[in-house]
Image (tube, rainbow, N blue to C red):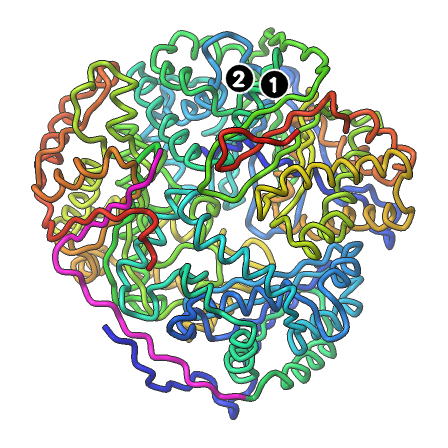
Amino acid sequence: MKTLMLGILLFGSLLAQEVVELKLPNTNKVTLKLMFKNGTVCDPAGKEGLTYLTSALIMQGGTGSLTYADIQNKIYPWAAGYSSSVDKEVSIFTFEVHQDFLNDFYPILKGLLLNPSFSQNDFDRVKRNQQNYVDQVIRASSDEDYSKKALEDFLFRGTKYQHMIQGKSESVKAITLEDVRDQYKNFFTKNNVMIGIAGNYSSAFLSTLKKDLQNLSAIKHLLPAIVKPQMPKGINVEIIQKDNAFGSAIFAGFPMNLTRKDNDFAAMMVANSYLGEHRKSYGQLYQKLRETRSMNYGDYSYIEWYDNGGRNMLQPAGTPRTTNYFSFWIRPVQIAKQLKNQYKELEDIKIGHAHYAIRLAVREIDNLVKNGMTKKDFEATRTFLRSYIKLYVQTPASRLGYLMDSKFYGKKDYVNEMDKQLAKLSLADVNKAIKKYWQAENMCVTIVTDKSEAEPLAKSLKENLTSPMSYSNIVKAGLPKEVLNEDDAVANFKLNVNEVKIINSADTFK
Amino acid sequence: MRTLFSFALPIFFFSAIGLSSNAATKPFPYPIEQHKMANGLNVVTVKFDSPGIASFFLVVRVGSRNEVEEGVTGFAHFFEHMMFRGTEKYDKDQYNEELKAIGASANANTSLDRTIYHMTGNAQKLEKMFELESDRFQNLQYPIHDFKTEAGAVKGEYTKNIASPFAQLNENVANTAFDAHTYKHTTMGFLKDIIDMPNQYEYSLRFFNRFYRPEYTTLLVVGDVTPEQVNKLAEKYFAKWERGNYEAKVPVEPEQKVTRFTHLQNGSIPPYVSLNFKGPGFDEKGMDSPSLDILLTILFSQNSKLYQKLVLEEQKVRSINGGIYDTRDPNLISVDASIVNKNDMQYVKDEVTKAIDAVKTNGVDEKMLSETKSRLKYSFAMGIDNPSSIANILSHIIQLTGDPESINRLYENYEKVTVEDLKAVAKKYLTAEKLTVGTISADAEGGVK
């Protein structure tokens, strides 16, 4: 799974500048997005996190003539805002300003992009926060995010996709200001930028912007080819143990050769929505784990990266990728230590709910692969999606973002085109696609949990021990027979477990 | 489903003052149409240019503030979950099917003073939204087993949230700062009460009967709709909803006399100092609320002297921010700082105190005051670009006063704030007697005086 530098030139200088325009004369602001096709796959080995640090420093530093503090003082009364976001294959700078101040703001914007100051002082500050994120924040503040990032690390091990956007503890330490300058020169160039603009702006403004961006670096750098990860053999589990975790946070998945570019995407969107639409109660995973058994706060599945799922209710733009994977998210379930404390009748249990929950989820996938969706579920899910995807683009910024992502995938307007594809779809298309892309035998699983839970859970998974659902008496008393029967089937469902490892929190992301 | 803003960041509410180019308009630039129904339900419509899309919100002025009885903290939030558990007409599965057919983004959340049920979706399905929501608001009926089961999901939510040390500190700060008022507990509630929730079925019936009433509720629709259409549907679907007669007697918090402290020993994140002053409840008539919003922006935004000194120059602080919890009753004004080195925790507290004391003595620069008013104005103007943002902004003001027009009055008041007003609120609220210091560090004690 080595990443090869194949030298694919994605944007030649002979190509015209890529521009996405969204004129909205009735709005009072202008939104500008610059998407650079670089992303963390361009981080040099040993300097993982460099693209993120470069983007962050451009946005949180000064220009040739203004310090960061000067800029903050200037834009304060305008309430103008700007920020960067970085993903595996792109970095995006977003600027938003009221039309009253567009002309005042422009020289600052231009200075940040073309003449960033890259001062040592700003570098130290921005790098320190990034270092803190990879050292502490990711491990300490949300076990859900932790398990999600750890899953990517696991799935893409050995590839350019493996490391976190922010890098790793050792690699961030190694980054110098000189590295940042080089990364800016090599990967934030006029040859790999896509311009997106929305709102109330003039053609003259856009012309000036386009002309000025010709002054970005002219280097035509070779972008690394993206090597697809290999399908894991069997079910491989990494249990990350930490002190005083309150529950077990679970993410699992396997590589899937499908993106928005592909014709099957609409079909898999329906299948996935049925299995586990993000933050909706309709999905099978949510219905069975949360609605029927109240094991946690929610359970969802994904056919592409979903940024900040704990906060975002609707899929945000800005993370287009050429490599995808299927995943499911089981929000923290109870551990034995807590359950024993809370219910006398559970004082003898060995493990909490994680093993059961994983079994249930994998069994649902298996059932879908074997049996497909029904006509009724297909129709209901398709109808839902045809309305729902339109909500992705409610604001000028989200409309612009989606149009730019569309271009990344070689499409004009993803949301509109997806609606047309959904309209044409048949049940047979969906069930065929499910069989093609999903399976229940091979996957990576990450679980962030308490130290007390790790060993017994690992044993239970490794030995495929029966894992009965441990209800409190008060809930158990009212459960219908079909739920109890299903519980039996789930508790004994055989997982194709290959390997189970326990890892200390301090040893993750190495 | 059902997110929870149990510890909403202390974000004050950005201004809606009309832009100078259009001085004749009200601060909030769209007409707010209100129709008060005979049963007390207030129906609010804001027409907005969002072709085919509308946001449908029900704002119930019940939150953890109303949890006055022993042993039932967290109940407003738990009840929000129960609202998705069906009626006689639509059991929970049928409700889900109907909701799915609408294709809307629908959810609910609870905070200290209110519970919001919201849907944003196809404006042509407006009548279906009315039908579904009016049915569950009047005819909620859940099996006792569903009630007991749902409590597990609430515990799951608590488990998810409490993984964060900040959530743990927040819980401790509220519990330390308040003695009598229900803001003592977070919206999530105390864990012991969450564990006991399955045993509170009878209480849940009483809760619904008390609070899910028209006089507690505002129906708000924003988007591609007309007031006539909305009012007609409201009369059709909500006219039979009966008014109630319950009012929770929320205890008054006694005056705090000395600084209080709470510390969380946790070395897994950088040292953290949280300074929490007892502030006022939201008051649209007086000048305290708008003055504090402006003062806290001046003191802690990224162009403030304090931020530039501590974060940019000295780099002793990773981030610092300040804001007030906008609530009906007096709540906390919070200043939070993430610190590089734990030896600087006391220094940071002292620097914040110095900056506050400077305002008490010298006031602030007039130019800074006028730039802050401009900032609030433009920030708001750029934010109202879609139906759900507008509905959220109006819901916030409705929770505070019950009247969406308060948004205009509040932001007219922002324009009137003077330097003397800022000095006055600094002296009145930002004092050592009203302070609760929360800290996180690897040490057994906070060590901040």
Task: Please tell me whether residue B364 is drawn above or below residue B20 in the rendered image.
Answer: above
Q: In the image, is A295 to the left or to the right of A9?
A: left
Give percent across and percent down for residue A293: 26, 28
Residues at badges 1 and 2 in contact (C-beta under 8 Å)? yes
Residue B216's disc number: 1
Indicate the secondary structure of the residue bearing disc 1: helix
- In three-dimensional space, the C-alpha distance between marks 1 and 2, rounded to whole angstroms, equals 7 Å
Which residue type does callout 1 highlight?
Tyr
Q: Residues within 10 Å of mark 1 (few under 14, many from 20)?
A: many
Q: Foreground residue, A434 or B63?
A: B63
Q: Is residue A267 above or below residue B226?
A: below
Asked whether residue B124 is drawn in magenta, I would say: no
Residue type, numbered disc 2: Tyr
SS class of the residue under badge 2? loop
Q: Quadrant of residue B201?
A: top left
Q: Is residue B227 visible?
A: no
Q: Could you tell me if residue B399 is visible in this image?
A: yes
Task: From this view, report whether residue B446 is shown above or below residue A31.
Answer: above
Q: Residue B310 in the image: x percent, y percent? A: 69, 50
* A231 magenta-colored: yes
Q: Whole-percent x and y of residue A129? A: 54, 55
Q: Which residues are magenta?
A: A219-244
Residue matched to label 2: B212
Q: Chain of mark 1?
A: B
Dot 2 falls on which chain? B
